[in-house]
């Protein structure tokens, strides 16, 4: 089927399905080769299979791939440029024109059909839902610098099939960092990198038998995924000193805790309770699963080290960069007792490291270079400022509510008079504030342990961009005033601030 | 607890657990503040919690965090530098010395304990195990350039909580790319990004009911994870025209196929069978799961488009960058019928995008810029050369074996005389070649469909670095000669090559 003149062949290319190696074209049909090729390209553009802006292969390559004469392909490109289907510019080759004729609505690729805006309810202007840092604070420059260093220095084997525990470079840095910052006692071979706390819980659910005791207040999302994984969760009461670990149910084989900053109510686990839960684990062969979700963000003179340091053989520490850098990176870790490493790796899947090796190396460099520490320090200062502003403004404008859980973290709890939580959340929404009530975090079985219902708001103060934070607090206070009545204080504070 | 003179305070810091905000230190115990701090830092280094090379916080920061006088901390640093525990250099601050005294073997961080070299058996010098590209071929420069462009241009929301389907920028590029290169008909909102084919199968196992028909030859790893996920797999015979889809078991609700290049035996699914499996799916409300694992690597004039194009409403296309770029990136995708999108997203987990947003944007840029196409084209040429060299050398030195499945992909099958496979694999290992036999890929139930056992080797020719490829082939041929006897041809070919 070598080179031939245009128009000489009277039939199509004779193949049921002749395709360019990189360009899927139907070259059947009557007419000269040139005409068939033009028709196929035109159809590919018209139907949207070749999207606007798509570069076409050089005509020499396409000719070689299709077994056509170069002239045939060059002529076809020229014709389609003349017809407006393609564009050709010196230096940038031939591309699909940016606005071809109307595309097939069913198969076409267009911006409206991609569902970008279809996720969930309409977003409110002020986001005080807990759980995520301000996306604008991500340290792009430092991250890119680390990526460049890490990728330039990486040995080739990085791009092969990796260790399911994660890159050793990252596990080494994590072992050193967690020892230094969180008092963790471990070694790199007891760390398994995963894609976040949820992934960690799914894996642990396969190796740590249930039932698990969980705090009476916690993430419903975590409880749901544990239930799905076959782990029954039983609630443990929570007070201002954290979980009542003196009341662990006898059947519990493990207990999932947030010792540094009870989530979401905010108390750190009392030192006596820390000792007592470690003793429980040793006595019962149980495991303590320590969700260290915001351990780096503590604003007091006396931060709390990880519980893991008390008994590395019975404690799993779960951490991630989701609060410190971004939940979009999907990098987390488990610090495991030696006895659990093998099971967790098997559950993870030998071929499924999940986290990208290049991003793991980038994070390892960020840790080693000190840039991670600098970022955390900067964020800690910012969060502390925001927390102080929240406390000050609430004290001035809504003095009848208390604010608790403020010693650490990215959120605080605004305690509300009994029966007002629903009204407060609704008022917040009317004032443009997305915020969650405390009741959504209650374990569904917490009535069984005599837990008294608390009304409150879980206020995430880390998320709004700097320029919107004051506005968000102002709207929150106004909402609380309207939900709780007696707006006199608001006027005073407003006057004072103007 | 403001500034104070060293040695004035006669007791420890008075806190049960006073810690630096970034440095976990036990500051209890008797003695001056300076002495207590020195003891705590020394202990942290000695025990390995502060690893060699770790930077210490600036003394001003640590002083502020601990509520100590700056002089106290500066003095403590100076003392420990003098003792050799720390080092201090102009411009790089204070760090833990690179070789402190012997560290606690249990808790210390050292290179030997990280398990870097503990994975699996001793590696053979020549890696011809199928499944992965040469790690040295990863396009680092292009990847970094795309990362820089993508991260610089990204809107802030990228670093927030993402769409569980994956970044829309990537889904748009994939829709256009797969339409152009694989003849796929889809839209961005029907694509879900995942971390690879195994992740895709785990998710599909939750929404597509079993049993699934699978090819009698396939990845045991995939069959195992499906079994674990509760999907019973039933084998379908395979011949040189791909799977015998005319013999799908009546109970099958779905069929998992490798239509472009049957894995691992190598035939493309015959056009009549393509039509017939599409008809089966339409008639039975079944699903075709198309594992398009190496669809970009075809070396013939007539590459085969994706089956998905025949019936986008009953076909799931599964793809990834694991063969084209690297398995270390953990980026894959599913192109889904509209009816399956919601279920797959729910199975994936609303909060678990798994793949890093920054890497998804990098890949989107790589696709949009044409760099991905250039890399695939370069790799295709290289793989084709390697395949040709394999075929030529085998024909010359081991002429009694056939080579099949060579029209596409990153591997070929060397057909062996009955009963010789085990000897050939063992001989290969003795010659330093890691390679797998065909029998490991057989479905355990394939006797029930009367499948005749084939002896063969699955030779992955993409993995070795360029400089080792000829040596790998030479060793493979020598191994086959020694396993099959009659070495005369080897001598001739050797003579001819010298």
Image (cartoon, coloured by chain):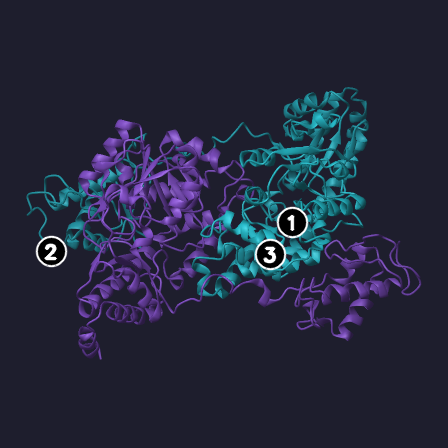
Chain colours: A purple, B cyan
Label located before the other in sequence (3 or 1): 3
**Discs 1/2, front:** 1
Residue at 33% across / 65% down in the picture? A426
Q: Which of A473 and B157 is in front in this view?
A: A473
Q: Which of marks 1 and 2 is nearer the N terminus?
A: 2
Quarter holding residue B461 = top right
Query: Which chain letter matches label 3?
Result: B
Q: Report the residue marked by disc 3.
A: B190
Chain of residue at mark 1: B
Give how far across and how far down residue A294 sits, in percent. Answer: 31, 50
- Alpha carbon distance from label 1 to label 2: 66 Å
* Nearer the observer, B130 or A155: B130
Q: Which chain carries label 2?
A: B
Say which label, 2 or 3, has the lower sequence index.
2
Q: How far apart are marks 3 and 1 (CA)?
A: 11 Å
Q: Give B446 or A26, whichever is nearer the viewer.
A: B446
> Is residue B471 visible from the viewing direction of this image?
no
Which secondary structure lies at badge 2? Answer: loop
C-alpha separation, residue under disc 2 versus residue under disc 3: 62 Å
What mark, if any, has residue A270 been given in the picture? none
Q: Is residue A15 above or below residue B82?
A: below
């Amino acid at each position: 089927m070598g080179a031939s003149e245009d128009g000489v062949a009277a039939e199509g290319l004779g193949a049921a399905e002749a395709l360019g190696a990189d360009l899927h074209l139907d070259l059947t049909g009557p007419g000269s080769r040139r005409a068939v090729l033009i028709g196929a390209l035109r159809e590919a553009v018209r139907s949207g299979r070749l999207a606007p802006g798509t570069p076409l292969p050089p005509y020499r390559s396409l000719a070689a791939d299709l077994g056509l004469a170069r002239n045939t392909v060059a002529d076809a490109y020229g014709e389609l440029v003349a017809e407006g289907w393609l564009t050709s510019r010196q230096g940038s080759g031939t591309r699909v024109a940016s606005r071809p004729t109307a595309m097939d609505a069913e198969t076409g690729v267009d911006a409206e059909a991609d569902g970008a805006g279809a996720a969930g309810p309409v977003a409110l202007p002020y986001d005080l839902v807990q759980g995520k840092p301000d996306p604008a604070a991500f340290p792009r420059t430092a991250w890119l610098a680390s990526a460049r260093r890490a990728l330039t220095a990486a040995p080739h084997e990085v791009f092969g099939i990796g260790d399911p525990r994660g890159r050793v470079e990252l596990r080494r840095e994590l072992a050193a960092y967690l020892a230094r910052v969180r008092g963790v006692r471990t070694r790199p071979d007891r760390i398994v990198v995963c894609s976040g706390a949820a992934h960690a819980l799914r894996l642990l659910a396969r190796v740590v038998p249930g039932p698990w005791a969980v705090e009476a207040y916690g993430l419903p999302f975590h409880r749901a995924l544990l239930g799905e994984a076959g782990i029954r969760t039983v609630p443990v009461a929570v007070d201002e000193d954290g979980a009542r670990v003196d009341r662990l149910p006898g059947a519990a084989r493990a207990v999932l805790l947030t010792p540094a900053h009870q989530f979401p109510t905010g108390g750190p686990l009392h030192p006596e309770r820390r000792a007592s839960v470690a003793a429980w684990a040793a006595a019962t062969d149980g495991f303590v699963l320590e969700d260290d979700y915001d351990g780096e963000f503590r604003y007091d003179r006396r931060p709390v080290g990880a519980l893991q340091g008390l008994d590395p053989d019975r404690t799993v520490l779960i951490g991630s960069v989701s609060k410190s850098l971004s939940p979009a990176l999907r990098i987390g870790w488990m610090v495991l007792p030696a006895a659990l490493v093998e099971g967790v790796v098997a559950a993870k899947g030998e071929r499924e490291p999940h986290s990208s090796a290049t991003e793991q190396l980038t994070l390892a460099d960020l840790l080693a270079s000190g840039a991670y520490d600098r970022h955390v320090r900067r964020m800690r200062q910012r969060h502390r400022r925001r927390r102080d502003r929240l406390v000050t403004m609430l004290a001035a404008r809504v003095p009848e509510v208390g604010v608790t859980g403020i010693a650490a973290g990215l959120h605080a709890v605004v305690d509300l008079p009994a029966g007002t939580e629903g009204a407060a959340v609704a008022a917040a929404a009317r004032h443009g504030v997305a915020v969650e009530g405390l009741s959504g975090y209650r374990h569904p079985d917490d009535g069984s342990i005599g837990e008294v219902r608390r009304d409150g708001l879980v206020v995430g103060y880390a998320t709004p961009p700097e320029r919107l934070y004051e506005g968000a607090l102002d709207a929150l206070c106004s909402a609380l005033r309207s939900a709780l009545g007696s707006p006199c204080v608001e006027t005073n504070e407003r006057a004072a601030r103007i």
